[in-house]
Image: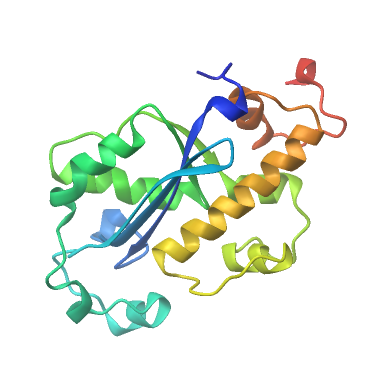
């Protein structure tokens, strides 16, 4: 798959909102959003609140605005798990700070006795740290400094839209450096290359 041309790959940009900072200590997902695209053209969208089956504290609500009342009648993760699997399977996952979102997804699947699909993961946070020059590498700050709207920051779909725009900003930048395949993008998220040369990677 890594030898696929960038234009041929289906990318799934994803963001989650959660009840806490760590799934190991019991944090759960209370909102998830995904946008599919290929060659920069949108090919699907999905967003839903989720009933996390645990209490959302006022401190957490103050960050993303999601209340216990908002999620009490929402589906549980198990109700949408196979939809997520279908969306992710065989595609490339894009997140901003992927370690955070993926750790929650893996835990949610694990609680159901399932495994998260094995996917190639690209992280716009790593792109920003390695190839960007932003005042801070937080999602909304990067979006603002690139001239993109950050309205709705900390809600899943708004964050997914920002992640998608930032991702394609970097894709365009990397193509100017002669990146052409998925493997090139994977390499470039962990290595800064000036005058990109595939032989160096």
Give me the residue at 31% from left, 31% from top: 117
Residue 187's spot in the image, x, y percent?
Answer: 65, 28
Name, please, the residue furthest toward the right: 195
Give me the residue at 58% from left, 62% from top: 139
Q: Eyeballing the image, is 2 above or below 61?
A: above
Residue 175's spot in the image, x, y percent?
Answer: 75, 33
Query: Which quadrant of the view contains residue 113?
Result: top left
Q: Eyeballing the image, is 100 above or below 178?
A: below
Residue 201's spot in the image, x, y percent?
Answer: 72, 21
User: How many numbered dots are placed on residues in this image?
Assistant: 0
Say which of 152 and 78 sits in front.
152
Say which of 176 and 121 sits in front.
176
Residue 4's spot in the image, x, y percent?
Answer: 56, 19
Left or right of 96 in this view: 23: left
Give me the residue at 58% from left, 71% from top: 150
Q: Eyeballing the image, is 30 above or below 177?
A: below
Q: Eyeballing the image, is 33 above or below 11?
A: below
Q: Which scheme is used to colour this image of the protein?
A: rainbow
Left or right of 128 in this view: 35: left
């Amino acid at each position: 798959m890594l030898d696929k041309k960038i234009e041929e790959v289906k990318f799934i940009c994803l963001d989650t909102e959660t009840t806490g900072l760590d799934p190991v200590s019991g944090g759960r997902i209370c909102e998830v959003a995904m946008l599919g695209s290929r060659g920069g053209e949108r090919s699907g969208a999905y967003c839903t609140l989720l009933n996390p089956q645990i209490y959302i504290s006022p401190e957490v609500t103050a960050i993303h605005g999601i209340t216990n009342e908002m999620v009490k009648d929402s589906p549980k993760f198990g109700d949408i798990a196979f939809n997520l699997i279908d969306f992710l399977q065989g595609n490339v996952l894009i997140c901003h700070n992927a370690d955070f979102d993926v750790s929650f997804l893996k835990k949610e699947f694990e609680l159901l006795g399932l495994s998260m699909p094995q996917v190639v993961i690209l992280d716009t946070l790593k792109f920003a740290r390695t190839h960007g020059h932003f005042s801070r590498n937080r999602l909304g700050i990067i979006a603002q400094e690139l001239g993109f709207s950050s309205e709705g920051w900390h809600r899943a779909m708004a964050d997914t839209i920002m992640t998608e725009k930032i991702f394609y900003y970097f894709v365009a930048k990397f193509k100017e450096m002669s990146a052409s395949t998925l493997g090139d993008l994977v390499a470039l998220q962990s290595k800064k290359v000036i005058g990109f040369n595939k032989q160096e990677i």
